[in-house]
């Protein structure tokens, strides 16, 4: 690596400006404004930095912060490619701009990367969005935050990362080797431990990590990597489920408080008991169940009333099975207005005829898990909730959604929203019945909540 040397003046004018600038106080150095930043990483951890900054052309000096502490092959040019003089200071340069409004800086440094075992990492505080090209044959293990774009340039993975703290962990080598599997497993173990420290139950992730460890011992390295990635995906899904459950608990508590303020106390004991059950499920790590029960408690509180004319109606048992809530509303309206109200009853749709063999014959190239999903939906009458499909196939949420979107693209699946859930069904072109006859019926209850007559855990998409 070349040593840093101050460039030589190109003319007497440069000498005069440098001499005058050196007599200026430090406060005369003006900071620069970043315009473009790119990093190119190599297999030995060296990083080529290409940095462009805007400067004030009316000032003789510009102060430019650099990345790292050692700078090899340092070159400083103006916007026209003319070499500029500079002086090096810890963490920054003072550039003699010669009236330029743009400064381009190129150098190499090893200070931005770190290696632990076979795992490399890059850390940088980016003053703007930064383009990062990883070494050839590098595999990303983890990164943060979410990239703005990902593409391949000259057989290198190229990431565009947003402004702020950027960290990327990557492995150099062949995917499916023992070193690669161990690195992926270590990354997942660290993520699970951090999640545990936040106070979450991590039994599901621990099970996946144990399967990854057993796969490594048996030499099944690719499968071990998949288990480790599923453990990390489990963390993200559980975090989302926890947040949604927390919001549902808060909403139920607010509904109960609102009913108390309004004097609507008829079913509040039932609502409080239901909410307590939701809290218990949450404390045990059952976030989907906690959310479902909390939403039920909210509906019970919303249906609570102070009107005496319905005294004697077994409203609490009815509310215990929330599927009967619409009938209770109809009954109360009928009693209040003394007007007969007809309750429409939709006929049960007959089971559609699905020729699964025809589908598989038309699509012989489908993956095994896609065929399994098609079979499961067909056996379920042609439609199923996405959450139930994921549960019965024992898939991570992200994997399940990729599969659903993949089969939608093949025009084998159709999806629609039912309340807060997504219903997945076989494409109508393979059904004898109109697709509108498929799917669960639902009823509206107060405050815009939905109750599905074919209940399942909320999808939490």
Image (cartoon, grey):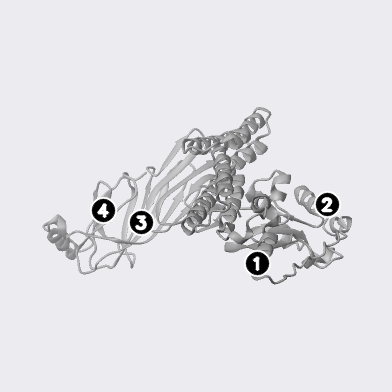
Label 3 residue SS: loop
Of pointers 4 and 3, the one earlier in the residue sequence: 4
Of pointers 4 and 1, the one earlier in the residue sequence: 4
- State the CA–CA distance, disc 4 to disc 3: 16 Å
Identify the residue under disc 1. Answer: 333
Label 2 residue SS: helix
- State the CA–CA distance, disc 3 to disc 1: 62 Å
Residue 191 lies left or right of residue 435; in this view the side is left
- State the CA–CA distance, disc 4 to disc 1: 78 Å
Identify the residue under disc 4. Answer: 93
Label 1 residue SS: helix
- Around disc 2, counting alpha carbons within 10 Å, would you say few (fewer than 14), some (14 to 19), or many (20 or more)? few
Question: Which quadrant, please, contains the N terminus?
Answer: top left
Relative to 181, residue 21 above or below = below
The answer to whether residue 19 shows anywhere in this view is yes
Of pointers 3 and 1, the one earlier in the residue sequence: 3
Of pointers 2 and 3, the one earlier in the residue sequence: 3
- State the CA–CA distance, disc 2 to disc 3: 55 Å
| Residue found 76% across the figure and 63% down from its top | 411
Identify the residue under disc 2. Answer: 379
Which one is in front, 198 or 64?
A: 198
Q: Position of residue 71 (x, y in %)?
A: 33, 47
Task: Mark 3 vs mark 1: give the one in front.
Answer: 1
Q: Are marks 4 and 2 in contact (CB under 8 Å)?
A: no
Identify the residue under disc 3. Answer: 127
Task: Mark 2 vs mark 3: give the one in front.
Answer: 2
Q: Are marks 4 and 1 in contact (CB under 8 Å)?
A: no
């Amino acid at each position: 690596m070349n040593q840093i040397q101050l460039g030589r003046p190109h003319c007497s004018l440069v000498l005069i400006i440098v001499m005058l600038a050196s007599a200026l106080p430090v406060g005369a150095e003006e900071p620069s404004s970043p315009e473009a930043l790119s990093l190119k990483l190599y297999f030995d951890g060296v990083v080529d930095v290409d940095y462009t900054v805007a400067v004030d052309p009316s000032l003789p000096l510009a102060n430019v912060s650099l990345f790292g502490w050692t700078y090899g092959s340092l070159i400083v040019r103006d916007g026209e490619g003319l070499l500029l003089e500079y002086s090096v200071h810890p963490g920054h340069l003072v550039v003699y701009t010669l009236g330029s409004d743009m400064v381009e800086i190129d150098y190499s440094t090893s200070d931005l990367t770190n290696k632990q075992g076979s795992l490399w990492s890059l850390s940088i505080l980016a003053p703007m969005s930064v383009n990062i090209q990883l070494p050839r044959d590098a595999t990303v293990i983890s990164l943060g935050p979410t990239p703005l774009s990902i593409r391949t340039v000259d057989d290198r993975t190229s990431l565009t990362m947003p402004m702020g703290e950027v960290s990327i962990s990557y492995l150099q080598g062949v995917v499916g080797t023992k070193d690669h599997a161990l690195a992926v497993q270590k990354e997942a173990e660290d993520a699970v431990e951090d999640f545990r420290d936040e106070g979450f139950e991590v039994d599901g992730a621990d099970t996946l990590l144990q399967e990854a460890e057993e796969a490594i011992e048996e030499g099944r390295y690719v499968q071990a990597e998949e288990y480790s990635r599923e453990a990390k995906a489990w963390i993200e899904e559980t975090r989302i489920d926890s947040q949604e459950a927390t919001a549902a608990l808060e909403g139920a508590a607010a509904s109960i408080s609102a009913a108390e303020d309004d004097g609507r106390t008829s079913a509040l004991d039932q609502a409080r008991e239901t909410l307590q059950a939701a809290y218990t499920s949450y404390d045990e790590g059952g976030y989907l169940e906690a959310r479902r029960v909390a939403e039920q408690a909210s509906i019970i509180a919303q249906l609570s009333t102070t009107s005496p004319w319905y005294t004697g109606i077994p409203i609490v048992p009815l509310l215990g099975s929330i599927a009967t809530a619409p009938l209770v509303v109809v009954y109360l309206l009928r009693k209040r207005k003394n007007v007969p109200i007809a309750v429409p009853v939709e006929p049960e749709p007959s089971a559609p005829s699905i020729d699964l063999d025809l589908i598989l014959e038309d699509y012989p190239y489908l993956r095994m898990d896609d065929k399994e999903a098609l079979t499961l939906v067909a056996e379920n009458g042609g439609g199923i909730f996405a959450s139930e499909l994921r549960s019965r196939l024992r898939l991570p949420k992200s994997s399940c959604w990729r599969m659903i979107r993949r089969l939608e693209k093949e025009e084998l699946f159709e999806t629609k929203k039912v309340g807060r859930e997504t219903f997945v069904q076989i494409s109508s072109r393979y059904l004898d019945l109109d697709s509108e006859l498929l799917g669960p019926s639902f009823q509206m209850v107060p405050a815009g909540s939905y109750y599905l007559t074919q209940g399942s855990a909320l999808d939490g998409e």
